Image (cartoon, rainbow, N blue to C red):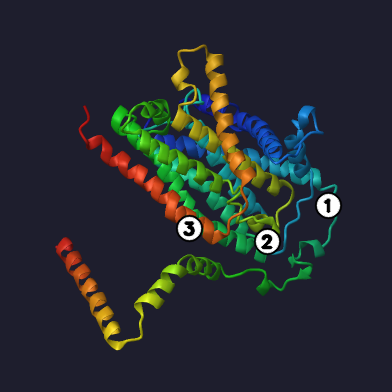
Amino acid sequence: MGLLELLFEAVVYPGVLFLSVAVWLTQWYYRKVCAHMQNRMGPSHTGPFGILQPIADYLKLFFKEDVSTEGSSPRLAVILLSVAIGSVVVLALMLPIAPRPIAAEYDIMLAAYLLVWPTIALALVGVLTPNPFSTIGTSRLFSMTLAYEVAFVASILTPVVLAGSLYGAGYSLYRSCLEAWRLWSDPRTVVPMALSLISALLSLQCKLLTKPFDIPDAETEIVAGPFTEYSGFKLALILGLHDAEIVVGSLLITMLFFGGFVPFAWLPWYVALIITAVEYLVVVAIITWIRAITGRFRVDQALVLFWKYVLPMAAIALIISVVMPGIPWP
Amino acid sequence: MMSLLASVLEATFVITLVLVILLIAYGLSVRATRAVMRSSEEKRRPFACGELLRPSETGVPDASMYWAIWRKLFRSLYNTLRDKIHTGVLSDWLFWMIIFMAVLVIALVVMMVWAY
């Protein structure tokens, strides 16, 4: 890929500008759907149907005074959060929505590394401020990371391994997205795909720190956990990272498990685009639905859920996907 | 498809680009908010529940929090080991220790055979 092409993709589509618009619309949709599920109105005053509310929130934080506590490292926090947002942007560039995606054989290793970066950045950002609530929130985040990150990476690996061994996708995230939707029509691979989809959705919910897994930033117990001391631009970066994770995480599940527009490539491009958008909105609606109907777990309950159920589910799916292609099939 | 090294380099380039963009935005935000900032040392001090904290009180040791959570998670396993296996009878303790040593010896032999 040429430098100008890469620059365009990183800055415009599907990079910073596209993700900013996607974050804006997704956050509005997320808040509106959650509000309706809980019999509330949601954002409704800023713009038609409150659609400009996310922009107003970010602008407010941009122009708000940025107070840094004594003994904290504000500049390091900005750098860590920016690198984490950069890693989310790279993940978007690795998906088939990019005109010329970043793709190589075995690039799933790069994707797994990039997926973990936002969590590491959020935990380190919590450590950087001198506050007991931040420390408690960060320790909760570290403990939960050990459970859900392993499950998330294992559940993403399952379709990649299956697509690699059955369709020669070469353990590339981009090529797996092009091939993995066909795995739903093969009776041998339906079970591991279903198991990994369920564990991926639950792990993503935990990765986004939304209910019932909002334990590290439980506002009624520890104010805002790792983010207690943050305000202004740095808080905008934290919220931006969270929203970008919702967008890219949901896009990843949409493209890797359902193929997005790929199964409908024979249709006119705008129909395929609408179908992809609907698939994406359904994934976001599932995340919102879980958030709206559940209460917060305790940290030990969340860990038990992941270690006893979600992680074994993802591990079984991964083991089946490794062993299954070697078994003869008529 | 390109090589894995090339894709890592492209990813690094994109991350650096985003970092530069956001640092510029941070600089603009600092410049924009300078007019509304009021200099006060008090608001920069660490408070919790309205009380000013001493530096030693501003953090909880991470290791303590980590082990507290893990001990709670594995409490049921620990209780089973303590209540069901530890009967207080000396011969039971001897039996337990012999089995434990036997497992260790078997593990050691297996490792030595595998190593050589």
Residue A122, position as x, y percentages in the image: 59, 52
Nearer the observer: mark 1 or 3; the answer is 3
Q: Please give left or right for residue A174 compared with residue B109 in the image.
A: right
Pick the quarter of the image with the N terminus of chain A.
top left
| Disc 2 element | helix
- Relative horizontal placement of residue B93, taking residue A225 as reference (left or right): left
Residue A179 visible? The answer is yes
For label 1, the residue is: B37
Amino acid type at circle 3 is: Val
Label 3: which secondary element: helix
Relative image position of residue B89 (x, y in whole percent): 32, 86
- In the figure, A53 relative to B89: above or below? above
Give the vertical position of A2 relative to A140 (above or below). Answer: above
Q: Distance between the Cα atoms at labels 3 and 2?
A: 21 Å
Dots 3, 2 in contact, CB < 8 A: no
Mark 3 lies on residue: A304
Report the chain holding disc 1. Answer: B
Q: Residue at x 61, y 69 (%)?
A: B60
Q: Which chain is disc 2 placed on?
A: A
Residue in view at x 17 percent, y 69 percent: B109
Q: Residues within 10 Å of mark 2 (few under 14, many from 20)?
A: few
Q: Are marks 3 and 2 on the same chain?
A: yes
**Residue B4 in sight:** no
Residue tagged 2: A221
Mark in front: 3 vs 2: 3
Q: Residue at x 51, y 59 (%)?
A: A143
Return the x and y of residue A293 as percentages of the image width and height: 63, 45
Question: Circle 3 marks a residue in which chain?
Answer: A
